[in-house]
Amino acid sequence: MEDFDPTERTAPASLLVVAAHPDDIEFCVSGTVMQWIERGTRVTYCIVTDGGAGGYDPALPRQAMADLRRAEQVHSAKLSGVADVRFLGYPDSFVEASVELRRDLCRVIREVRPQRAIIPSPEINWARVADLHPDHRAVGDACLRAIYPEARNPFAHASLLKDEGLEPWTVHELWLMTGPTPNQYVDVTSVFDRKVEALRIHTSQTAHFDDLAGLLRTWLGEHATAGGLPPGRMAEAFQIVHID
């Protein structure tokens, strides 16, 4: 494997993006991912829940909603250039940072062996609490514990090594999304239209928005301003955490 400098801000060779629900990635980080893919990054998406509690149609059975959201995510990921999409199938709205979830995340980490991971922040962002689902924080907590120290520890979830042959793996760097203290802003203006298109594929979650592009433009514009970018630019926000 090539050497990896964890202070490098350019595209990593391999990236794992973990999200609680289908559409979280498209809302929060897909513009950044698209640009890294253009520079050669190999990307895997891991969606923790089945998305069955989402949507706005009470007549639609929950399993049908889960199936629909899975299909939407696969289609949207393909538009962004991501073919490897994994679903853990946990019930939507009931996620806990359980031993089982941490083991499943460790499995994905050891299989994918990413240099960098994007995960939800486990912290509450009180400035945008209405936008934060408890599943996001639970997944962030589980991811953080899976990445450090469990995925790198051969004695944690020992069956992964003993029975599945999955060697320990160290993720060098985390990029947290939706957290309260971002310290990195990525200009996504050049891929904004593609980001909106990828999000619109999640029809079950976005069809009710009168102006989805306008909503994103406002939100990403606020990030760009916070990051000191020129007027008219749009950005996605992250908190970067180094792991030695």
Image: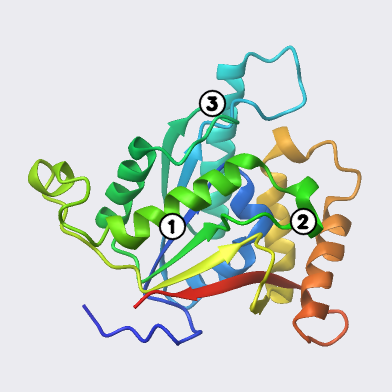
Circles 3 and 2: CB distance less than 8 Å? no
Task: Determine the residue positioned at 38% across, 39% down.
Answer: 101
> The residue tagged with tag 3: helix, strand or loop?
helix
Q: Quadrant of residue 109?
A: bottom left
> Tag 1: residue type?
Leu
Relative side of 153 to 163, left or right? right
Q: Is residue 118 left or right of residue 58?
A: left
Q: Is residue 143 left or right of residue 56?
A: left
Query: Considering depth in this image, is 43 or 191 the residue closer to the camera?
Result: 43
All told, the count of numbered labels is 3
Which of pointers 3 and 2 lies earlier in the amino acid sequence?
3
Residue reaching furthest to the right: 210
Q: Return the mark for residue 67.
A: 3
* Mark 2: amino acid: Trp
In x, y percent, where is residue 110? Answer: 25, 56
Sequence order check: which comes first, mark 1 or mark 3? 3
- Kindly identify the amino acid type of the residue bearing the numbered disc 3: Asp
Q: In the image shown, does 210 or 90 lie closer to the viewer?
A: 90
Badge 2 crowding class, 10 Å Cα cut-off, few under 14, some 14 to 19, many 20 or more, is: few
Q: CA distance from mark 3 to mark 2?
A: 32 Å
Q: Which residue is mark 2?
A: 126
User: Compared with residue 129, is residue 34 higher up or lower down, i.e. above or below?
Assistant: below
Could you give the CA–CA distance between mark 1 and mark 3, rounded to whole angstroms?
28 Å
Density class for disc 1 (Cα within 10 Å; few <14, some 14-19, many ≥20) is many
Indicate whether 150 appears above or below 47: below
Q: Closer to the camera, 101 or 204? A: 101
